Amino acid sequence: MTTKYLFFTGGVVSSVGKGVTAAATGLLLKERGFKVAVQKLDPYINVDPGTMSPYQHGEVYVLDDGAETDLDLGHYERFIDIRLSRVSNFTTGQVYAETIAKERRGDYLGGTIQVIPHITNEIKRRIGLVEKETGAEIVILEVGGTVGDIESQPFLEALRQLRNEVGRENCLFVHVTWLPVIGATGEIKTKPTQHSVAALRSIGISPNVIIARADQDIERSLCDKIALFCDVEKDAVIPMKTASVLYEVPLLLEELGVGELMLNKLGLKATLEPDMRPWRKLVDEVKKEKPTVNVALVGKYVELQDAYMSVREALKHAALANSVEMSISWVHSADLEKDKGWDVVKRADAVLVPGGFGSRGVEGKILAARYARENNVPYLGLCLGMQTMCIEFARNVLDHEDANSSEFDRSTEHPVIDLMLDQRSITDMGGTMRLGLYPCLLQPETKAANAYAVPSVEERHRHRFEFNNAYRTEFEKHGMVFSGLSPDGRLVEIAELKDHPYMVASQFHPEFLSRPMKPHPLFVGLIKAAKEKAGK
């Protein structure tokens, strides 16, 4: 079968839900029997988001092969339940770096290097890698940003060229746009969408489908108006009201006939009858009245909750598995250092300390770990959250008052967290950490082993500092259990407290492998312990 392409572009504003819509559409197509792959094209000039501030970019989502990617790839994996690779995300920075490297090698035989054809050819080459690597029958491509951004122009031009090369019958352009509301009149306006489509058409692309987003119901007459002014068939304008539950989006799109619409326009016929019952059951469970447990998330970037997108979703998945409502209290770790925010932590049924980089707010995370340990509050630490748990233990149980990570204090006498041996000669910051999927052996009769219920697992990593094995024996003598180790026994992967309801922390990032239908065991264990603490 000839590979078909679905191109998703965004209009009017960013953060319009394009990634979620693309992911949900991928699910509908997979349910109809097609092998689906997804790719995100990011127009920024950074090589990848790995060195970007979470305030600028949000979460860095790590794949099995160690690629540091956009958070939308988390949506793709969670909705479609597929495992992506580094070909599923690339940036302007990567495109230009590769093109310039070829020019330096003389690959272009002294020719003048231009955006067209050299940059657009490199974009098309990278798009082609998805089908080659995955053998997908349908490739979904999402172009980051908004139509009209100068950064996205080469990507859109490359898609225009690709449409002509693979055949118009094998491509579908889906434009996800926003319908603003005038506050004084409560009137939904279509004019920004018309301008957005006009900008797209000015570069030679006419959308085949428009998904019109709004926070309120969209009347059919408005959709007909959009169809008229944007030269799109009436049945191809899809009104998409903001869903109250994220995982309801595939159900809404299914009800609106989007799956069949896409197949009809691509000339395809479903080989399977879509079964959306698991998703309906999931959404019904979300909406059901349930007792609430409160989790204090003590982080460094809580002002932008997208920095913890996968953590938040993994907590939701675990709450559903435990038949409870989950409420997150966002606590800035730096506030705890100033004796602020403790009332929120003390009201919580569990404490979660996620990853992060740099010394800002670290002492607050250490204080949160101490509070959880001393008060038997369920605790889950992720990456830096494991390291701060170990630092706190060394200071307050082992009496090493200046214990620290050499990341934060190079002169500490007790570097219980230290730079990994294979990281010590590295000077570049980008893409140089321990990244991607690594095996972990679980120690029998531990909380971690009981949670996973298997002897070994593979988890995704993103770190360059690790537990210092010089302290392992001393920690174990005082009640710390290293319940997950690398196969050679050198790297501590999971640490937990023996005499505590649930104080477990991992060097890896379990949130990246949690799925709505398959919640991650460590998160399930945390919420179960929180539920028991709350007596619910």
Image: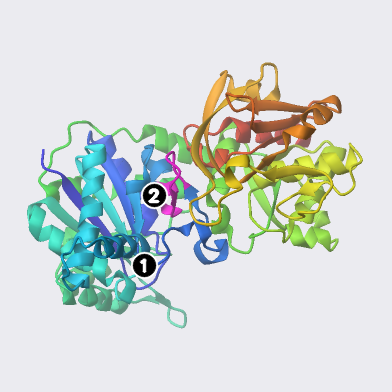
Residue 534 shows in the view: yes
Whether residue 36 sits left or right of residue 385 in the image: it is left
Q: Which residues are magenta?
A: 62-75
Please determine whether, in this image, residue 207 is positioned above or below residue 384.
below
Q: Please, what secondary structure does the residue beneath circle 1 have?
A: loop
What residue is disc 1 on?
Answer: 145
Q: Nearer the viewer, residue 275 or 96?
A: 96
Tell me what residue is drawn at x 26 percent, y 45 percent.
130
Provide residue 482's location: percent of width, then percent of height.
71, 27
Tell me what residue is drawn at x 21 percent, y 77 percent.
198
| Location of the C terminus (image quadrant) | top right
Provide residue 131's location: percent of width, then percent of height.
22, 43
Callout 1, which amino acid? Gly
Whether residue 26 sits left or right of residue 433 in the image: it is left
- For this orientation, the residue located farthest to the right is 399
Alpha carbon of mark 1 to alpha carbon of mark 2: how far?
21 Å
What residue is disc 2 on?
Answer: 249
User: Which one is closest to the eye, mark 1 or mark 2?
Assistant: 1
Kindly indicate whether the residue at mark 2 contacts the one at mark 1 (C-beta within 8 angstroms): no
Q: Is residue 63 magenta?
A: yes
Callout 2, which amino acid? Val
Decide which of tag 1 and tag 2 comes sooner along the chain.
Answer: 1
> Where, by quadrant of the figure, is residue 335 drawn?
bottom right
- For this orientation, the residue located farthest to the bottom is 184
Please determine whether, in this image, residue 377 is positioned above or below residue 484.
below
Provide residue 535's location: percent of width, then percent of height.
77, 33
